Image (spheres, helix red, strand yellow):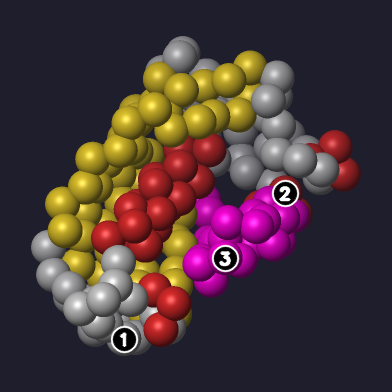
Amino acid sequence: MKNTTKSLNPAYLEAVAQRINRCPYFTLISMELKSMDWGSSRVEVVVGERHLQPFGFVHGGVYSSLVDAAAFWAVHSQIDEDMGMTTVELKLNFLAPTSKGYLIAKGRSIKVGKALCLGEASIEDETGKLLAHGTSTMMILRDVKIKGSREFPPKFLD
């Protein structure tokens, strides 16, 4: 399903980012898809009180959500337009706690197969300190699309 001969349409990328950033889960934890390109993505959270666990550090679920989202959108850039995905496995290493600032997740596609895909993401703070790293395995779903994507421009140019 990997399409190495076409270029991503910037208008599609903008439409996806706008839709994703308004979805209920992203707004719930103040997560934002900042960029997506061929095989890469960037997702950010500005840490607030709602992200903290009882000891005052960012909850591991926030790290998990960031790794999952960044890996997912990095891989999504490389699958065919008429397909969607869902995560089937997530593995994380929590490397350092934080309680304030920015969480910046950089996702990368590792492998796009016919049925399964593998992505990874690292989370850093605004100083570049590595906070977490993980991998995500995703299953390709045929004929599953982002809600409202019929209004999107084509995914690929050419």
Q: Is residue 112 visible?
A: no
Q: Which contiguous range is marked in magenta?
A: 15-39
Residue appearing at x 63%, y 25% in the figure: 83
Q: Residue at x 34, y 86 (%)?
A: 101
- The residue pinned by badge 3 equals 28
Given residues 85 and 88, the one toward you in this image is 88
Farthest front residue in view: 54
Residue carrying label 2:
12
Q: Earlier in the sequence, mark 3 or mark 2?
A: 2
Mark 2 burial class by Cα count in 10 Å: few <14, some 14-19, many 20+: some
Q: Amino acid at mark 2?
A: Tyr
Secondary structure of the residue carrying tag 1 is: loop
Left or right position of 84 against 89: right
The amino acid sitting under disc 1 is Lys
* Residue at 57% across, 65% down: 28
Estimate the x, y position of residue 41 in percent, counting from the top left: 45, 54
Q: Which mark is residue 100?
A: 1
- Placement of the C terminus among the 4 image quadrants: top right
Q: Is residue 13 above or below residue 30?
A: above
- Horizontally, residue 63 falls left or right of residue 65, namely left
Q: Quadrant of residue 152?
A: top right
Q: What residue is rendered at 30% in x and 38% in y? A: 90
Q: Could you say whether the residue bearing mark 3 is in a helix, strand or loop?
A: helix
